[in-house]
Image (cartoon, rainbow, N blue to C red):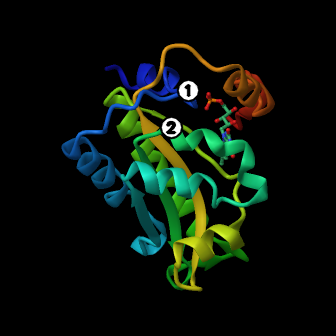
Amino acid sequence: MDFLKLLSSRHSVRDFLPDAVPPEVLSEILEAGRIAPSSQNRQPWRYIVFRNRERIRELAQKTGLIGLSNFFIKEAPLVIIACAEMKKNLRVNKQDYYLVDTAISFHQMILCAHSHGLGTCWMAAFSQKTLAKYLEIPKSWRIVALSPFGYPKGEKKLYTKALSFFGGGGERLALEDIVIYKD
Ligand SMILES: Cc1cc2nc3c(=O)[nH]c(=O)nc-3n(C[C@H](O)[C@H](O)[C@H](O)COP(=O)(O)O)c2cc1C
């Protein structure tokens, strides 16, 4: 697929078919994240993968109060949680790069998944404290994002329609609103 078409056809998906993600596709998705660039090649990203339906259902209840709206992840056959090892952080100009690095890596995974026809949804609405406790991750790790991965269900539930509306709809700013040329 043409690269821009791949990018513009990706949308957040919140309704999933129960079909499992083939193991070779999961391997490719993880590889897409592994080979990402990072500041000083520090590769701070760490991934926690949930493939078991019961565990995913349990996880959906453990994202904390702020994560209640994200209960839709319980339908997905796969959930990946992107964490960052803060000991690998690069700080330049008073800016921490572990979040940038991990976001680049995770988004490569999201795009790779989309190229295989899988739907995803970046999610930030979770309680860091509650989820970290549930995942039993080291204190030096920070949860950056999580996403369900699964084949999209054609029709959207009213609940997920409302979520995408409250999530900002999907409209993008025009180029003239975001680009400044200094020719
Ligand atoms: C960093 C980040 C955090 C997000 N957090 C959530 C979330 O917690 N719950 C949710 O339903 N959608 C979440 N979204 C999805 C956005 O609402 C969505 O990407 C945006 O509205 C654009 O729509 P599109 O992804 O369909 O193009 C998040 C997206 C990003 C990039």
Q: Residues within 10 Å of mark 2 (few under 14, many from 20)?
A: many
**Residue plotted at (56% across, 43% down):** 73
**Residue plotted at (69% across, 70% down):** 130
Which part of the image, by quadrant, shows the C terminus? top right
Q: Is residue 126 visible?
A: yes
Residue 167 position, x and y percent, is 75, 34
Kindly identify which residue carries mark 2.
Answer: 75
Give the residue furthest to the top: 155
Which part of the image, by quadrant, shows the N terminus? top left
* Comes first in the chain, label 2 or label 1: 1
Q: Nearer the viewer, residue 171 or 71?
A: 71
Residue 154 position, x and y percent, is 49, 14
| Secondary structure category for the residue under label 2 | helix
Give the residue furthest to the front: 54
Going by the numbered disc 2, the residue's amino acid type is Glu
Mark 2 → mark 1, Cα distance in angstroms: 18 Å
Going by the numbered disc 1, the residue's amino acid type is His
**Residue plotted at (31% across, 37% down):** 20
**Residue plotted at (47% across, 73% down):** 44
Q: Is residue 85 left or right of residue 163?
A: left
Beta carbon of the mark 1 residue lies under 8 A of ligand 1? yes
Q: Nearer the viewer, residue 178 or 103?
A: 103
Give the residue furthest to the left: 24
Kindly identify which residue carries mark 1.
Answer: 11
Q: Nearer the viewer, residue 91 or 109?
A: 109
| Above or below 9: residue 14 | below
Residue 158 position, x and y percent, is 71, 19
Q: Is residue 68 left or right of residue 92?
A: right
Residue 49 position, x and y percent, is 39, 59
| Above or below 59: residue 137 | below
Q: Quadrant of residue 90?
A: bottom right
Q: Quadrant of ligand 1?
A: top right
